[in-house]
Structures are given as structure tokens and as C-alpha cells.
Amino acid sequence: MTTPTLPHISVPPHPVWPLLEPKQKRALMDRIKAYLKREKAVLVAHYYVDGDLQALAEETGGCVADSLEMARFGAEQDADTLVVCGVRFMGETAKILNPEKRVLMPDIKASCSLDDGCPADLFSAFCDQYPDHRVVVYANTSAAVKARADWMVTSSIALPVVQHLHEQGEKVLWAPDKHLGHYVQKMTGTEMVLWPGACVVHEEFKSVALERIRRLHPEAAVLVHPESPDSVVQQADLVGSTTQLIKAVTELPNPEFIVATDEGIFWKMRQLAPDKKLIAAPTAGEGATCESCAHCPWMAMNALQNLADCLEKGAPVIRVDPLIRERAILPIQRMLAFARERGIGSRQK
Ligand code: SF4
């Protein structure tokens, strides 16, 4: 069996958006609201995008959610247009589930290191080596990679799906995040082969610096997304998806939380638990090896300015080849049906 050699991931610099005066911001938000009405469009935003976009999505009847809920919400809407504020695979998933709707994104270059690190041709050759394994891919993959999968999962549902396959006596081929795959393997005891990809944001969380911060804040609970390295996951009081981490801040009695995931999540955490102190888990820091500094450079490509432009121009539009779509929808529908049957996931408001 050969281990795939992954392509080099080129990480873009963080976009620098001009600061808006409160008056300018209000005017831009009003313009976006008018476009949303005119286009019969709804905003579907991820927890990692800028807080202004999350606020606007909520104010206008859209949603702010993790990838599982974004997919589900988009499929329930009778709007003509879905505007996905997130990264490209989220726009593609929305298009796969809603071929009759127009799907727009503020910036089509908003990619993801996991998606870029798992090209469909290499992945397909990897799958060919394990014909007796069930192929489970994370949502952070292209439509073409999903088309090769049996199941698509998000971090909210990865454990129960793989546990279910394990109980059926199945072996699993997992892609693309090796850290999440390793965590799922450890928790379920399933025989798994892992694609060796990683998220540039979560990979940067540093375990030694985290130990130091924990000593300084003994009352803090450590919340970790399972895309983080094992040495960071092992220090967690709670490991979970974005939705599970948000829930923990509202439900755990701790006055402080050290959070190891994209700092965009703080907007929702502060909204739901304003009295709790939130501390960002340490990364390597700017000027060191860190290319992310706890904020995804692709998620940061979403801003009020290019959201207004995309609604005004009706572009960029997300397209998915109909033949790929026909195959890619199956693992997504399988996940949604499984979530429905087991009552997994509930939208955060
Ligand atoms: S935070 Fe990581 S997994 Fe999420 S979109 Fe960015 S690169 Fe991809």
C-alpha cells in the first residue's frame, strides 16, 4: 500500500479589509438587506466568519451554524438564492443539495487546506487500494471527492457514524483530516486507514504553550476541536464540533474557557454567554511558523464589502457538474438521514 504524497498547500495571506466607520457599516448592511429581499436570497453563514456577517445572517432570517446545520438549513429554504458565507466546499454542498437554487459566495477563492490537500484523482487511487473499506469523507472535501465516498460526515456526526459502521463490522477509509481521523479511530476502536491531510489553522495549536496557559487559568475548561493535534486534544476537558463547543460554554459552570478552534467562534460564544471569559488557545504566533494565527485565511475572505458586491452582481456562482452531483449527493443524504433518525444536531440560535 502506498501513502499518497500530498500537494503543496499555498496558504493565502489574511485579507486586510478597510475599516468601516459605524455609519458606513450601517449603510452597507442596509444595502445588503435590500439586495437579499430583491434577490429572494438567504444568508447561510459559518461560525468562523466575521461577526458582522453572522449578525446580519441572524437579523435577516438566515442561519449561523456548523457545516451540518448549514447543509440542512439550505435544503429547507424556499428562497431562490442561497448566499454561503464560508468556504467553497460549503457552497458546493449547498448546490449539490439544491440544484434548482442559485448559490452565491462572496469569494470563490475561499478554499480550505483539507479540501486542497485531497485532490480527487489521488484520492480515487488511494480508495482503489482498499476496496473492502467503507469510504467516509469529512465535509471539507470537493464534490468530486464526495462522489467517491459512501458517507460524508461533519465533526458533529463523525463519531456516531463511524461507531455505527464499526458495529456492522466495517473497516473505514477516512479522509482528509488525519487528526480528526485519529481521534475517531481512538474513540470507536474501528480499523481505519487515514488520508494524511491537516487543517492549517488547527494544526498550529501548540501543546506546551497550552499547558502554560492552563496553569495560569486553573479554573478554565479547555475546549478543543478534534482537528487539532493529539497532544492538544489530550489536554481537553471537552472535544467537540463547533456547535458542541458553543454549547459547552453555555452549559459548563466554569467562569473561563480556553478555546482551541478558529477565533470566529467567539462571536457566537459571547452572544450566548456574555459573562464567561474566553481565552484563545496559543498558536505558534505571528512571525513564527504559524500561517493561520487561529483564524482561517480562507474564512477571512468573507466580508460585508464583497458580500454586497456578490449580491449586486449575482456572482460568483457555485456550479457543480451534474454527473458528479448525482453521485456526490448520496453520501450527504445518507448522513442527513442518519442525523434525522438519531436526532443528532440542533440549530444554535
Ligand atoms: S479552519 Fe481549517 S478546516 Fe476550516 S475551512 Fe479553514 S482550513 Fe479548512
Image: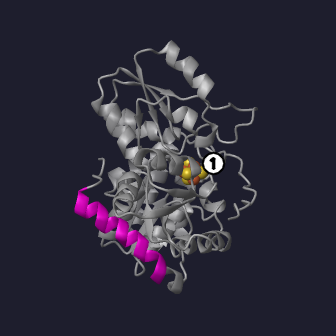
Q: Which residues are magenta?
A: 326-343
Mark 1 CB near ligand 1 (8 Å cut): yes
- What residue is shown at x 56% (from left), y 24% (from top)? 210
- What residue is shown at x 37% (from left), y 75% (from top)? 80
- What residue is shown at x 49% (from left), y 28% (from top)? 235
SS label for mark 1: loop
* Amino acid type indicated by mark 1: Pro
Q: Quadrant of residue 35?
A: bottom left
Left or right side of 115 for 253: left
The answer to whether residue 193 is seen in the rendering is yes
Work out whether 47 lies above or below 193: above
**Where's residue 223, x and y in %?**
44, 33
**Where's residue 163, x and y in %?**
36, 55
Work out whether 186 lies above or below 3: above
Mostly what secondary structure, the magenta segment? helix
The single residue placed furthest to the front in the displayed view is: 169
Q: Quadrant of residue 82?
A: bottom left
Work out whether 132 lies above or below 66: below
**Where's residue 84, x and y in %?**
47, 62
Q: Which residue in the protein does label 1 denote?
A: 297
Is 189 magenta? The answer is no
- What residue is shown at x 55% (from left), y 38% (from top)? 230
Is 338 magenta? The answer is yes
Name the colour scheme.
one colour
